[in-house]
Amino acid sequence: MADDLLKWRSEFPILERTVYLISHSLGAMPRATFDRLHEYADIWATRGVRAWAEGWWDMPVTIGNEIARIIGADSNTVVMHQNVSICQSLILSCLLPLTHNPKRNKIVCEELNFPSVMYVYDAHARAHNLRIETVKSDDGITIPLERMLAAIDEETLLVPISHVLFKSAFLQDAKAITERAHEVGALVILDTYQSAGTVPFSVKELNVDFATGGSVKWLCGGPGAGYLYVRPDLIETLQPKTTGWMAHEHPFAFETEMHYAPNITRFLHGSPAIPALYAAESGYQIINEIGVAAIREKSLRQSQYLIKLAEEAGFQVTSPKDPAQRGGTITVWDDNAAAITKELIRRDFIVDYRPGAGVRISPHFYTKDEELELIVAEMKTIRDTHAFATEKVGAAF
């Protein structure tokens, strides 16, 4: 079977020397990123401060527009930030005045949300009049939809959810959750970190109020380039308290009072991380050129093949078996999964491990079928020969 997407392999240097199956954690770096970072350094060296007026100042929006194409958003509704924690905090800073209403101060979260996001909400809950209701999982893999919907009521202010759960790759029904939240007047933040670039979706069709994510994983954009989407009709109605001069209507007037910009830039704050934005753009351009639908088609085929190989080798697959309920990652359990992962990495088979899930393995558009066969065969050999370190580790990268 011909795989047209393999032509992109030559654009990713690390694939020449490793079996790289960790795009759920850090996508492979495009070769063009070398040139983009050199361009950044050259512009700084030759144009100096003039670079701000020659493109740098606009990059949080112009690069955000590349993300907008991937997540099905309108132009000028996405801005770039350093990470999701900042984005989530910024959104909360818009809504905290609403928490003075004691009847609408509940945040509905899920037990399997990414911990870093929950740190933000726990900290704000202690400092403000917020209470958190956590929806539990029965199996550590999925969040029951009916339980999630039942938790969202007229007291709910905000529902921050992960589109794809990071441990198990469970793909949630974001549309149903959003519809329920809007029925009772609550807002939804969709964390698309584990879906953007490998699962097709449109934030407009889902009608979410906000979406956050980053470039480290499937977007092959590297660290330091997070993004925030705001639903267009909300842009001029919210006033972030986490703010800075880039959010001002006239930033170079250096006024002592804040006057928010009448567009998406009001959701910026201080000076942006320009090098990270240069580094990220090449990955976005490749994803947009291929198209997420084509990436998903290959991902579904390869992830099903990976499940088959793992089960035939006697491993337990802990990701959902139904492709419609799964993102791009397959999690494989063994009692010695942490130690097996450590040994795999030592042998240049790059995967990772998460407690309660197992070895996380992620084919992407640049992955060969043979690499899936190689990783499972190597795991089986390591397991059967006990060729792994005896100590258990909490995580392996």
Image: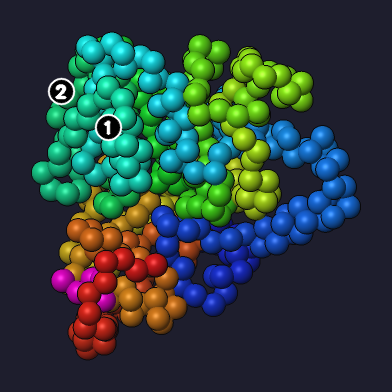
Q: Amino acid at mark 2?
A: Ala
Tell me if residue 63 can be seen.
no
Tell me if residue 214 can be seen.
yes
Q: Residues within 10 Å of mark 2 (few under 14, many from 20)?
A: few
Q: Which residues are magenta?
A: 335-339
Left or right: residue 19 versus residue 340 is: right
Is residue 72 placed above or below 363 in the rendered structure? above
State the CA–CA distance, disc 2 to disc 1: 25 Å
Q: Tag 1's secondary structure?
A: helix
The rendered magenta stretch, by its main secondary structure, is classed as helix
Left or right: residue 356 versus residue 238 is: left
Rendering coords of residue 291 (x, y %): 55, 43
Name the residue rendered at 54%, 70% in the picture.
15
Rendering coords of residue 209 (x, y %): 42, 22
Rendering coords of residue 274 (x, y %): 68, 46
Residue marked by disc 1? 126
Q: Residues within 10 Å of mark 1 (few under 14, many from 20)?
A: few
